[in-house]
Image: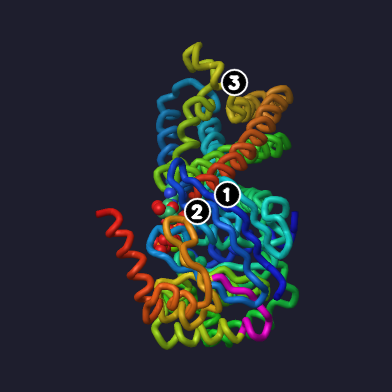
Amino acid sequence: MGLRVIEVNHLTKLFGNAVAVNDISFSVEEGEILGFLGPNGAGKTTLIQLLLGLITATAGEIKILGIDLIKDREAILSQVNFSSSYVSMPTSLTLWENLSVFAKLYGIKNHEGKIDSLLTLFEINHLKDSLTRNLSSGQQTRLSLAKALLNSPKILFLDEPTASLDPDIADKTRTLLKSIRNKSRTTILYTSHNMKEMQEISDRIVFLDQGEIIACGTPNEIIQNFEEENLEDVFLKIARRKVENIE
Amino acid sequence: MSLVRIIALIQRHLYLYQRSLPRIMEIFFWPLMDLLVWGFITVYFQRFNIGLPRFVSFFLGALIFWDILYRAQQGISISFLEEVWSKNLLNLFVSPMRPCEFLAALMTISVGKMLTAGAASALLAWIFYSFNIFLVGISLIPFVFNLLVMGWAIGIISMSAILRYGQEAEVLAWGLGFLIQPFAAVFYPVSILPIFVQPIARMIPASYVFEGMRAVLETGAIPYESLMKAAFLNGIYLALAIRFFYYNLRIVKEKGLLLHRGTE
Ligand SMILES: Nc1ncnc2c1ncn2[C@@H]1O[C@H](COP(=O)(O)OP(=O)(O)OP(=O)(O)O)[C@@H](O)[C@H]1O
Ligand SMILES: [Mg+2]
């Protein structure tokens, strides 16, 4: 068994009286790609924000890289990173300026080389002196991913990172993420509503619904458990079951 | 605190200003408009000989000082809004940046904005009306310092409110200073205010600065006692403002609003 880089115990988050995350526990091993799946409002974003300390938990314990999140958030944050389609970078700065600001925030030494190699990796090096506002949304996503790799994170939190990518770039991005994982043993937590993508990239899937883990396992295990053909059918089965319950 | 991170945060704003003509123009535009309109009005009044000996000087000095206070405040609140508008807040708060480093960077930016705007309006007053703010002499330094710290306090309070309440509170970034203006003895002495309002004015550090400025222009004597009072009040307000910021940051994390602030 590999090293446990994330340990979550009895984590709960209430917003007022509404339960967004309901007493969940799980752990993630080093080098694992863990996909969070679930309908809108299932609690995926809340969970990721909890793990990053952007939201304080109502109850429960979070340990990342062996460090208690409440006790030493900064020690964790310098070793992890985050990207999502709902954040962006200042548009009046060039790509290079943006990345150099974040390189300094993450305390990266000799960051010029690092920035250059990341821009090349994401095929946006020719744009490095362009203003960020002139990028297409897919290019902005790639810039945001480059930012997320600046500090060679041990854990990468990605909340719907491929939402605005075309199928080609989305595919390239998945391949890239996998190769980063294979090379550097980076652990990746991932959310997406694209079932094929989730099936392809995830070593293990955590299925969330109404803040609870309702299934957990490799994509194949989950598909077999629900006696379906693929993840999409599993998803629909769970979503429709909910509707039946309401009716 | 990491100096490198503070510098990185400042650099981000320098990059922004360096190529944003509207943002640079804004620093000069309002002082220019204020000085033109109010300056000529005072000159006009002066011609009818209202009788106040240093009427024009008082007014121009007040305009320059007000601009200093206002820019010091905006250096914080608008710089914060820039992060909100560019949906960058979350990127910052998932980095190892500490909130105190964020504050330190904004306060430094505020100094820069204040000095630029102060120099611009002083220069314009000198060009248009041959008014030399340096007549205030060495007490210019404690005056400006007090205005700066008060600007920080107002800026941090408006920033915290925006953090907590979002776009609805954005107007505070421009408006909170003006809410205080009537009581800050900017253009008239505290004694003009109704008796029951005067205690409010005495609680506002800037009122001592503006009264002190008039005293220096009139008599040349530096009002040490007023400056001490202003500094004392400013110390308290700045400490309260910073606590208010940390308090709101905690609330926002509990309510899960950081994401909304960064993306709405
Ligand atoms: N700041 C908040 N205040 C109150 N309720 C919230 C807040 N943030 C999220 N919620 C609620 O918590 C639940 C989980 O939301 P969350 O954003 O985590 O879902 P999600 O799984 O990411 O959904 P999506 O697939 O739409 O991104 C939802 O019911 C949502 O309405
Ligand atoms: Mg979400």
The kind of residue on which mark 1 rests is Ala
Q: Position of residue A36 (x, y in %)?
A: 49, 68
The residue labelled by disc 3 is B202
Q: Mark 2 vs ligand 1: CB under 8 Å? A: yes
Q: Position of residue A138 (x, y in %)?
A: 43, 78
The residue positioned farthest toward the top in the image shown: B195
Q: Residues under labels 3 and 1: Cα distance? A: 43 Å
Instruction: Tally the marks.
Output: 3
Q: Residues under labels 3 and 2: Cα distance? A: 50 Å
Magenta span covers which residues? A180-189
The residue labelled by disc 1 is A57
> Counting residues from the N terminus, which is met first, the one under dot 1 or under dot 2?
2
Tell me which residue sits at (51%, 66%) in the image: A90
Question: Circles 1 and 2: CB distance less than 8 Å?
Answer: yes
Q: Would you say residue B220 is visible in this rendering?
A: no
Tell me which residue sits at (70%, 58%) in the image: A74
Q: Position of residue B87 (x, y in %)?
A: 48, 61
Q: Secondary structure at mark 2?
A: strand
Chain holding disc 3: B
Q: Looking at the figure, which quarter contains the C terminus of chain A? A: bottom left
Tell me which residue sits at (30%, 56%) in the image: A245
Chain holding disc 1: A
